Image (cartoon, helix red, strand yellow):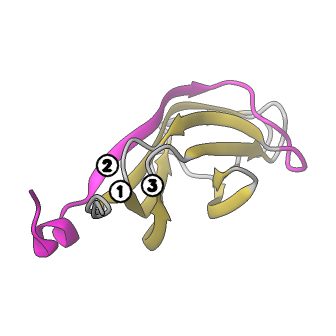
């Protein structure tokens, strides 16, 4: 069992996507890139992404972390190879069983992104006390 201090110090990186993104929505329409069910109660403390190579007309990628239709965090205009974009210091509560997803949109529909890695940083929460 974790103590409160252990829990505050423990942040678990969770990979939600790793690979090449060869087709993604345009600026007006975001496409789903990854979907998963939260496996425990936790706080999302970070959202980050990076890629190794891009191609196409003025490549840039916008990503959103969502629960249902609610946007929880956004990474806007990733435009540089091998540079990580990160939102840290988040404190988004998630319950076991919540359906989460990452959606993305490129500036132009011919944009592709190789070596894309999307991570969520999670901090476990204690189970609810039983009555």
Q: Is residue 42 left or right of residue 25?
A: left
Residue with the mark numbered 1: 122
Residue with the mark numbered 3: 84
Task: Give the magenta range.
Answer: 1-29
Q: Disc 2 vs disc 3: Cβ atoms closer than 8 Å?
A: no
The quadrant holding residue 46 is bottom left
- Pair 1/3: label in front: 1
- Pair 1/2: label in front: 1
In reply to whether residue 24 is colored magenta, the answer given is: yes
Task: Check disc 1 and report its element: helix, strand or loop.
Answer: strand
In reply to whether residue 109 is colored magenta, the answer given is: no
Give the Cα separation between the discs numbered 1 and 3: 18 Å
Q: Disc 1 vs disc 2: Cβ atoms closer than 8 Å?
A: yes
Task: Check disc 2 and report its element: helix, strand or loop.
Answer: strand
Q: Nearer the viewer, residue 21 or 126?
A: 126
Q: Nearer the viewer, residue 45 or 85?
A: 45
Density class for disc 3 (Cα within 10 Å; few <14, some 14-19, many ≥20) is some
Q: Residue at x 59, y 35 (%)?
A: 35
- Pair 2/3: label in front: 2
Between discs 2 and 3, the one toward the N terminus = 2
Q: Quadrant of the C terminus?
A: bottom left
Q: Nearer the viewer, residue 94 or 26?
A: 94
Q: Is residue 12 left or right of residue 113?
A: left
Between discs 1 and 3, the one toward the N terminus = 3
Q: Is residue 90 left or right of residue 121?
A: right
Q: Position of residue 101 (x, y in %)?
A: 61, 43
Q: Reply above or below: 56 against 11.
A: above
Give the Cα separation between the discs numbered 1 and 2: 6 Å
Density class for disc 2 (Cα within 10 Å; few <14, some 14-19, many ≥20) is some
Density class for disc 1 (Cα within 10 Å; few <14, some 14-19, many ≥20) is many
Q: Position of residue 24 (x, y in %)?
A: 75, 33
Q: Position of residue 27 (x, y in %)?
A: 85, 49
């Amino acid at each position: 069992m974790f103590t409160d201090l252990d829990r505050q110090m423990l942040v678990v990186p969770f990979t939600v996507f790793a690979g090449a993104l060869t087709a993604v929505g345009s600026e007006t329409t975001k496409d789903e890139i990854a979907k998963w069910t939260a496996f425990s109660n936790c706080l999302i403390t970070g959202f980050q992404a990076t890629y190794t190579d891009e191609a196409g007309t003025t490549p840039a990628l916008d990503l959103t972390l969502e629960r249902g239709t609610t946007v929880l965090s956004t990474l806007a205009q990733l435009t540089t190879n091998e540079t990580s974009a990160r939102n840290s210091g988040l404190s988004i509560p998630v319950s076991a069983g919540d359906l989460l997803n990452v959606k993305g949109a490129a500036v132009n529909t011919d944009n592709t992104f190789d070596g894309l890695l999307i991570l969520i940083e999670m901090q476990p929460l204690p189970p609810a006390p039983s009555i």
